[in-house]
Amino acid sequence: MSGKTEEKRHSVEETEAALIELLPAQKYKLNALARVRAAGIPGFSGDDLLQDVLARVLKGSRPWPEGVDIIAFMDQTMRSVASQRRRTHRRRKEKIDIMTASAVQTGDDADDPSDVIEQAASDDLGADQMLIAKQTLRQVEALFPEEKYLGVLLWRAEGHTPDEIKQEFSMDQTDYESASKLISRRLLRFTNGQKE
């Protein structure tokens, strides 16, 4: 008998129920995390990543461990799937680079070798942009530990109207104006490098 204990997992039904019960702010946080995790993967958006992970989770191929927050579990799963996608893309790109280099050496019609260098540079830029996006997301999340304010901010960033936001977060006009002022103050202080 091995010394390992089996980790308890939630059923697919429990996982589905937990995902359905997510608050609007939690859903937007999950979408924001998906966009960050998918950054730099050509042809694969945050929505694609989230849908891929939801399919895996709801099929039961990625079970949710008991005692782990659902958002943390989904984020870790998205990170794993995104990493797998990046590796696959990198292997394909390496094969294309080898084929292009071979074609250039033999004189076949192929892309200009400088295109390969330019593509590699743009991939590095994508990695830098992904790192900056992750850092910025963490900083903004730290500014708004209250999920309601983070949700309002994300909804505003996505172009929703004040009426839609008030309805989604069960706010009256006064609540919305107070939240907007608090968000503005915190963001202003953040951009000026100050703490509240």
Image: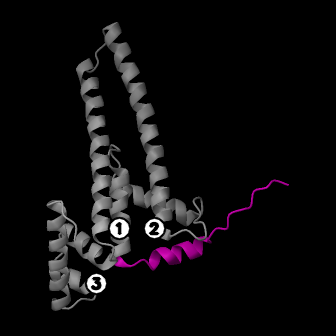
The circle drawn on residue 71 is 2
Extent of the magenta region: 1-24
Total residue callouts: 3
Separation (CA) of disc 1 from disc 2: 8 Å
Q: Whole-percent x and y of residue 69?
A: 51, 70
What's the amino acid at mark 1? Lys
Res 162 → quadrant:
bottom left
Badge 3 crowding class, 10 Å Cα cut-off, few under 14, some 14 to 19, many 20 or more, is some
Q: In this orientation, which residue lies closer to the viewer: 96 or 64?
A: 64
Label 1 belongs to which residue? 29
Secondary structure state at the residue bearing disc 1: helix
Separation (CA) of disc 1 from disc 3: 14 Å
Q: In this orientation, which residue lies closer to the viewer: 10 or 58?
A: 10
Label 3 belongs to which residue? 169
Q: Whole-percent x and y of residue 42?
A: 33, 43
The residue at the point 58 percent across, 75 percent down is 13
